[in-house]
């Protein structure tokens, strides 16, 4: 089949499309063929289905369908049309007649209709030119699709980049919903971000900035570290001098040899002088005056001064050691107190300073120990170089002071953070954002330029398309005439109605509806007249704009209403005659008589028809050209009704009455072990069966209630059975042919089951032969 004859072969899916909640066809479902009939009771989704077809006609989802509707059609070339894509595949080749078409085309109250434009013979050359321009326009549209896809792809890539980059920044800077693609685009609009803003060491610096952002309150301020003792070298030098100094000015050789006795001698001399003793208390010998003079000349006030100097030196050394210990104690822990960006450097300096101070403190400890010995043995002489290396102490002290100054600067930075906590967090956010913005600047610019290029290219092309469209529109106005369409409509209308009082006449932009040459206003047409005019108007649309029927897919939804049998038959004859040559015809109806007429016309062309069955006995190709379908509705609870398209049940296909099919529903309900999916429609089903059965068994004009009261008593129906049937009649008084699926019965579950059982028993007792034959038919499915 060529592209020109492209038709629909299958509805593959209907999801969230009104009553079609989740429809997929059964595996043995016959395909859509050239002629198709879809029959269903009211409320079974027929209008919804026609609007799905309308979506294919316009190339856009019908406004009355749910926005999240999803559907898919299979075409005769094996491709698909989906609600999400390619909706315009058959846009120019599909016509839908339904209530929406009538409402949009004909204004009954104003007595007006939109124009139907035919191409006149005198405009043949212009029509050829129009065809060429339309063919070229199709190529332009194809190019538009390519350019739109390119633009959409560029926009999608750009959008995904912005979304992903914004998400990266949001996560890195802990911004949550405070930063998204819009903020990212705004940042790039303000300025460009060069490579200088990229963090030099992302793995190290980024975690530091992130920890700053997560700080809920600033770290406490820290007092700066005590300065290194400034006179330390002087104290060391003074101690060295004192250690080396002796009592060399004491002449007595024996005292020099016994320096540790100097204290005892000095104290003894002072005691003997104060008490004016002439003999030694220790040895008892007389103290010679010359000896006293010698002792006093050796031990005078300089001894006291010397001893005081040594003690003072010891105290200064101990004080220096305490100062160094205090300095060590004052250095804050790097893990608890210093801000993150200082921590690595501070940790190094912290360890270095402590090591230097400990080295000095250790040297001072050794020196202090020697000075204390000097206090005990004042006359001992000690060389400082044997205790410590003064030049090394100088270098160590200098290094320690420099290190301490660096620590102090880091602590000052730490304290400045305390004073500028919020600014620090803001700066951390900014550095992180600018880091990633700088990293992505080139990609952003490239993608943005790509979007602009594709948009500019598409805009230039669309300008060409608009100009071409305008040329086609102007040329079409020269070619089109709606006068001939008016004549065609009037001819159809007069043949349909059998009279000429109702006509249409042309206006500048459409038609006027007249009765006896006076425009009809206020909607005074009867329903039959509206139906006639609607059908004739639609049929005239087939030839509009040079369309060819054999190229078209035509969908007709319930074309008749309020018609008597004669008018209905004529309406069907008009439609079938006018549309039989279509590439594909799909008829939808809820009207039993119209369904019977369509079925009679199509049945021979189906795989169940006599002509088809005859071919099975020959070697000739068996090709069915018609399919019959049914809209089957199930309802397990009040809220959930669901429709599906099935092959028309044989009890509807093979009989000219709904009775056989309804009896099968009743029998299936009674046989079901659990609640039937048809439970909620069973009251209507039972009432309709009861009406049809008693109409045959009790001919007459009496109502259903009267006929039940006349049921012969010899049938053996007990009182409870009769009451169940009376209850059914009292509550189920609507619907002549099971049309009203939207009404919910007042019968309870128990009453419904009891009524079904009573009805089956009534039919069996009243006419057992009929009952047995119907059971055999029903058991076939």
Image (cartoon, grey):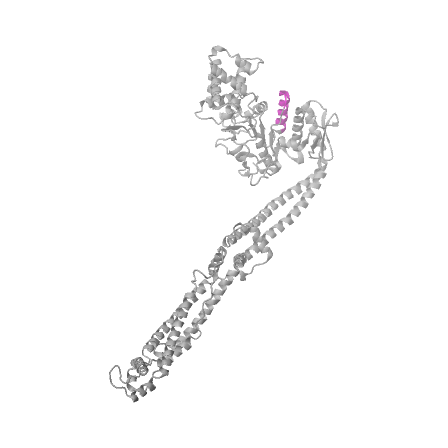
Outermost residue, top side:
714
Towards the viewer: 667 or 26: 667
Residue at the right extreme?
517
* Quarter of the image where one finds residue 626: top right
The answer to which of 77 and 482 lies nearer the viewer is: 482
User: In x, y percent, where is residue 358?
Assistant: 38, 70
Q: What residue range appears in magenta?
A: 562-578
**Residue 324 visible from this viewpoint:** yes
Main SS, magenta residues: helix
Q: Which of 68 and 187 is in front in this view?
A: 187
Magenta stretch: residue 567 in it? yes
Q: Is residue 351 above or below residue 261?
A: above
Query: For residue 327: magenta?
Result: no
Q: Position of residue 63 (x, y in %)?
A: 60, 36
Relative horizontal placement of residue 633, taking residue 304 as reference (left or right): right
Q: x%, y% of residue 461?
A: 64, 48
In the picture as drawn, the residue positioned furthest to the front comes out as 276
Quadrant (top left/top right/bottom left/bottom right) for the N terminus: top right
Up-down relation of residue 25 to residue 665 (above or below)? below
- Residue 423, x across and y down, in percent: 54, 59
Q: State whether residue 644 appears in this view.
A: no
């Amino acid at each position: 089949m060529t592209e020109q004859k492209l038709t629909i072969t299958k509805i593959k899916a209907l999801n969230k499309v009104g009553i079609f909640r989740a429809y997929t066809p059964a595996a043995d479902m016959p395909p859509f063929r050239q002629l198709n009939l879809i029959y269903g009771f009211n409320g079974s989704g027929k209008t919804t289905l026609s609007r799905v077809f309308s979506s294919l006609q316009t190339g856009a989802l019908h406004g009355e369908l749910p926005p999240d509707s999803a559907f898919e059609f299979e075409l005769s070339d094996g491709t698909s049309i989906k609600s999400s894509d390619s909706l315009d595949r058959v846009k120019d080749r599909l016509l839908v007649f339904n209530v929406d078409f009538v409402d949009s085309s004909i204004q009954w109250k104003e007595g007006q209709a939109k124009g139907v434009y035919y191409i006149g013979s005198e405009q043949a050359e212009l029509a050829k030119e129009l065809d060429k321009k339309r063919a070229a326009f199709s190529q332009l549209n194809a190019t538009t699709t390519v350019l739109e896809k390119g633009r959409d792809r560029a926009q999608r890539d750009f959008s995904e980049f912005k979304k992903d980059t914004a998400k990266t920044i949001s996560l890195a800077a802990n911004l949550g919903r405070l930063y998204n693609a819009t903020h990212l685009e705004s940042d790039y609009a303000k300025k460009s971000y060069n490579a200088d803003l990229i963090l030099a060491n992302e793995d190290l610096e980024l975690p530091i900035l992130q920890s700053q952002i997560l700080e809920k309150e600033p770290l406490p301020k820290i007092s700066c570290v005590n300065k290194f003792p400034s006179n330390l070298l002087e104290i060391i030098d003074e101690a060295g001098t004192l250690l080396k100094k002796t009592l060399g000015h004491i002449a007595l050789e024996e005292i020099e040899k016994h320096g540790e006795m100097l204290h005892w001698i000095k104290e003894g001399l002072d005691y003997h002088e104060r008490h004016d003793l002439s003999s030694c208390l220790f040895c008892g010998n007389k103290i010679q005056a010359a000896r006293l003079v010698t002792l006093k000349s050796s031990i005078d006030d300089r001894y006291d001064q010397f001893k005081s100097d040594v003690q003072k030196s010891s105290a200064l050394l101990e004080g220096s050691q305490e100062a160094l210990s205090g300095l060590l104690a004052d250095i804050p822990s790097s893990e608890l107190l210093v801000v993150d960006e200082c921590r690595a450097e501070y940790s190094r300096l912290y360890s270095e300073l402590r090591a230097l101070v400990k080295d000095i403190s250790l040297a001072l400890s050794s020196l202090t120990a020697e000075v204390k010995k000097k206090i005990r043995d004042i006359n001992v002489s000690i060389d400082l170089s044997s205790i410590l290396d003064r030049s090394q102490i100088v270098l160590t002290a200098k290094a320690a002071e420099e290190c301490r100054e660096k620590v102090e600067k880091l602590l000052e930075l730490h304290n400045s953070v305390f004073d500028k906590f919020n600014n620090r967090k803001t700066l951390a956010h900014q550095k992180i954002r600018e880091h990633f913005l700088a990293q992505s600047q080139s990609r952003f610019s490239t993608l943005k330029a790509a979007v602009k290029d594709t948009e500019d290219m598409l805009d230039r092309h669309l300008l060409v398309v608009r100009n071409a469209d305008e040329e086609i529109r102007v040329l079409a106005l020269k070619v089109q005439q709606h006068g001939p369409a008016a004549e065609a409509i009037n001819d159809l209308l007069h043949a349909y109605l059998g009279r000429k009082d109702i006509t249409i006449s042309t206006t500048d932009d459409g038609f006027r509806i007249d009765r006896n040459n006076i425009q009809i206003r206020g909607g005074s047409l009867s329903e039959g007249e509206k139906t006639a005019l609607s059908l004739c108007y639609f049929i005239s649309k087939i030839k509009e704009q040079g369309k060819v029927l054999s190229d078209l897919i035509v969908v007709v939804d319930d074309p008749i209403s309020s018609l008597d049998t004669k008018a209905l038959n004529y309406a069907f004859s008009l439609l079938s005659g006018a549309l039989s040559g279509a590439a594909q015809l799909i008829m939808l109806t809820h009207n039993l008589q119209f369904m019977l007429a369509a079925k009679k016309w199509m049945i021979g062309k189906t795989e169940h028809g006599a002509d088809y069955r005859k071919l099975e006995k020959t070697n000739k190709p068996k090709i069915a050209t018609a399919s019959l379908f049914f809209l089957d509705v199930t309802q397990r609870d009040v809220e959930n009704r669901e429709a599906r398209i099935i092959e028309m049940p044989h009890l509807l296909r093979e009989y000219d009455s709904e009775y056989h099919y309804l009896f099968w529903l009743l029998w299936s309900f009674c046989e079901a072990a659990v609640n039937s999916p048809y439970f909620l429609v069973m009251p209507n089903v039972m009432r309709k069966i009861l009406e049809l059965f008693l109409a045959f068994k009790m001919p007459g004009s009496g109502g259903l209630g009267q006929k039940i009261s006349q049921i012969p008593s010899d049938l053996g129906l007990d009182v409870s059975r009769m009451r169940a049937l009376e209850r059914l009649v009292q509550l189920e008084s609507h619907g002549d042919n099971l049309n009203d699926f939207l009404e919910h019965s007042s019968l309870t579950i128990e009453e419904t089951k009891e009524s079904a059982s009573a009805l089956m028993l009534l039919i069996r007792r009243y006419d057992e032969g009929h009952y047995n034959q119907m059971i055999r038919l029903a058991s076939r499915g």
